[in-house]
Image: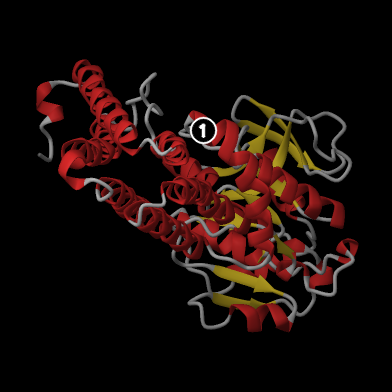
């Protein structure tokens, strides 16, 4: 649904093309759909600039020449020529985490279902579409509800009931009228998406708040102590600047890798101070790629895969550069440090795979890349290359051994051998 004009935004762009974090709203929504595995996408647009922006991307584009007739009219236009069967309905002016869609689909809804948020704090309740639920059933929906206990996130799983309600009530202008008719007949369910990021962008103030909230939510559960307490303080403002300049996550991943190569070359050239500084720079930039991906709505599996791959190459390069300062005496701790650093990542990913993501514990973030690069930075600045390699060799391999011991009781031997 991308036919809104967005007069309250005070923008020279059509509302779907308004940029949040350097990326147009409609692009963010389409990227979120595709990241959730949606391939066939219909966009109902109002402005020709939206059509020109989207053409050539494998989308079905439907023109709404009368957007003043309301969102229900856009829905009816989108349904024309669309095969019968379930479909997702989302708004181009609603930011949402693609994981909301994934969780909704994993729930395997059987009725038309709306993702709701029960956390009302910090929301503009005057403008929000409100929802009254009883258990999983939605009893009423609309902006004017006086009694409500949740908010409409703008993400729907629709059955053919929606098609029937929209086409049989041609006078309906709002989606709330269409969905309200289903709710009155007991045909509209709620899926609790509380805690998952979403935001409705109606005003310039909403846009600024959205960028702020996106920046605030950049920390990941898997962050190590250095990332959480040091790197993020530097990477967050840097990421916001790079997002506004149009940098892509993959470009930043390559920049982080180049910083790692600069660190390796500095160590090998006998300049450990700059080797340590550029290693820490690589660590900070390694957080920026994911942050920019989230701010710009450009998260992708390929980007995450590329980032992980370049990290491994960067780690090995830095440790080889350190070893090259005195290869005759440092080859053994250097080799053990390389093996341990690689195995830290490998053991975490394999254990999560074999346990379906259940492998969590006190060792989850110990000796992660942020910690290892911080130790390398300290060792480089102090000129203690041999001691740093010895510490890395010892701690990384000890953690690998402890992870192995923690993993064994979590699964049967048969499950652990799966795929080996």
Instruction: Give percent across and percent down for residue 13.
Output: 79, 74
Q: Position of residue 42 (x, y in %)?
A: 56, 70
- Quadrant position of the N terminus in the picture: bottom right
Q: Position of residue 214 (x, y in %)?
A: 67, 46
Near mark 1 (Cα within 10 A), the count class, few <14, some 14-19 or many ≥20, is some
Residue located 60% across and 38% down the image: 196
Q: Tell me the SS state at disc 1.
A: helix
Identify which residue is drawn at 83% across, 44% down: 143
Q: Is residue 199 above or below residue 413?
A: below
Name the residue: 87% across, 32% down. Answer: 146
Q: Which sits in the foreground, 5 or 197?
A: 197
Image quarter of the C terminus: top left
Which residue position is annotated with label 1?
226
- Location of residue 411 with respect to 86 vertically, above or below: above
Q: Nearer the viewer, residue 237 or 302?
A: 237
Here the colouring is secondary structure
Residue 116 is at least partly visible in this image = yes
In this picture, residue 348 sits left or right of residue 292 = left
Residue 414 drawn at (x, y percent): 9, 26
Residue 326 vs residue 231: left or right? left
Give the residue at x 21% y 40%: 330
**Residue 192 can be seen, yes or no:** no
Front residue of 351 and 202 = 351
Report whether 113 appears left or right of 126.
left
Question: In the displayed structure, would residue 45 be above or below residue 147?
Answer: below
């Amino acid at each position: 649904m991308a036919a809104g004009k967005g007069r309250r935004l005070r923008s020279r762009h059509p509302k779907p093309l308004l940029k949040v974090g350097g990326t147009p709203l409609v692009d963010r929504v389409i990227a979120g759909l595709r990241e959730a595995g949606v391939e066939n996408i219909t966009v109902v647009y109002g402005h020709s600039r939206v059509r020109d922006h989207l053409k050539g991307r494998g989308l079905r584009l439907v023109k709404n020449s009368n957007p003043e007739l309301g969102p229900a009219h856009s829905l009816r236009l989108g349904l024309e020529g669309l095969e019968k069967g379930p479909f997702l309905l989302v708004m181009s002016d609603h930011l949402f985490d693609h994981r909301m869609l994934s969780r909704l689909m994993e729930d395997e809804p059987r009725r038309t279902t709306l993702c709701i948020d029960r956390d009302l704090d910090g929301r503009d309740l005057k403008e929000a579409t409100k929802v009254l639920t009883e258990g999983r059933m939605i009893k009423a929906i609309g902006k004017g509800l006086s009694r409500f206990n949740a908010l409409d996130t703008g993400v729907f799983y629709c059955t053919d009931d929606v098609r029937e309600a929209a086409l049989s009530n041609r006078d309906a202008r709002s989606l709330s009228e269409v969905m309200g008719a289903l709710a009155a007949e007991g045909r509209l369910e709620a899926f609790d998406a509380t805690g998952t990021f979403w935001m409705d962008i109606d005003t310039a103030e909403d846009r600024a708040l959205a960028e702020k909230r996106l920046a605030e939510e950049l920390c990941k559960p898997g962050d190590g102590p250095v990332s959480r307490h040091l790197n993020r303080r530097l990477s967050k403002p840097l990421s916001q600047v790079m997002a506004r300049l149009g940098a892509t996550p993959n470009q930043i991943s390559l920049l982080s890798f180049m910083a790692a190569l600069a660190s390796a070359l500095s160590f090998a050239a006998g300049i450990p101070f700059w080797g340590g500084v550029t290693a820490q720079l690589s660590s900070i930039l390694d957080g920026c790629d994911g942050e920019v991906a989230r701010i710009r709505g450009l998260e992708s599996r390929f980007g995450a895969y590329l980032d992980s791959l370049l990290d491994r190459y960067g780690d090995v390069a830095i440790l080889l550069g350190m070893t090259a300062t005195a290869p005759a005496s440092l080859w053994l701790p250097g080799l053990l440090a390389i093996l341990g650093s690689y195995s830290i990542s490998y053991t975490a990913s394999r254990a999560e795979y074999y346990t379906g993501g259940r492998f969590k514990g006190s060792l989850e973030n110990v000796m992660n890349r942020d910690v290892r690069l911080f130790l390398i930075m300290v060792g480089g600045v102090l000129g203690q290359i041999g001691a740093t390699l010895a510490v890395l060799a010892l701690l990384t391999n000890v953690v690998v051994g402890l992870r192995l011991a923690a993993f064994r009781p979590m699964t049967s031997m048969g499950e652990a051998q799966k795929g080996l």
